[in-house]
Amino acid sequence: MATITPQPVPNIAIYNQLHAGKSEDWQRVMPGTQAPVPIDFLVTLPGRERTSLSVRPGANGTLSILGDGKPIGTIRTSGTPVRLTPQPFGPGYARLGIVEVRATAGASSGAARIEAALDGGARCVVHLVVQ
């Protein structure tokens, strides 16, 4: 649902195609294995051109999204256990607003939810089907 705001807000969205279906927000992965496609998020920060983005491990299995080294959001999981690993990008991609994570499923089957959120901005959800 779209909301009109007096000023632009930070936004985060899935950047890459997660499987052969178009515009779908899920991947299938076997227990104990890594998802076949890394998850790329595109971040836009109004009024902050050329911000260098990165991801680092945070508390309780979350990942922190950093803009110029300062926390601007988080990536967290819920549901079936999934481990997220940040993948470094070269400075060109980082300045374009793209961050990448790899998801590895735990030993149990089920549905996992990966939610990326920016402070004061949008949320983006990716689903992993572990079976």
Image (spheres, grey):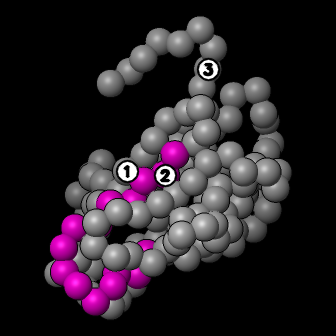
Quarter of the rendering occupied by the C terminus: bottom left
Whether residue 28 is visible: no
Circles 2 and 3: CB atoms closer than 8 Å: no
- The single residue placed furthest to the top in the displayed view is 6
Instruction: Name the side, left or right, on which 114 lies relative to 52.
Output: left
Q: How busy is the neighbourhood of tag 3: few (under 14 within 10 Å), some, or many (20 plus)?
A: few
Where residue 78 appears, as percent x and y from the top left, is: 35, 63
In the picture, the disc for residue 40 is none
Can you identify the residue that label 1 sits on? 125
Q: Bounds of the magenta span? A: 103-117
In reply to whether residue 110 is colored magenta, the answer given is yes
Quadrant hosting residue 8: top right
Instruction: Name the side, left or right, on which 103 lies relative to 107.
Output: right
Q: Secondary structure at mark 3?
A: loop
Mark nearer the N terminus (3 vs 1): 3
Q: Residue at x 23, y 77 (%)?
A: 130
Q: How busy is the neighbourhood of tag 1: few (under 14 within 10 Å), some, or many (20 plus)?
A: some
Q: CA–CA distance between discs 2 and 3?
A: 18 Å
In the picture, the disc for residue 8 is 3
Three-letter residue code for mark 2:
Ala
Q: Residue at x 79, y 62 (%)?
A: 91
Q: Is residue 71 above or below residue 104?
A: above
Quarter of the rendering occupied by the N terminus: top left
Three-letter residue code for mark 1:
Val
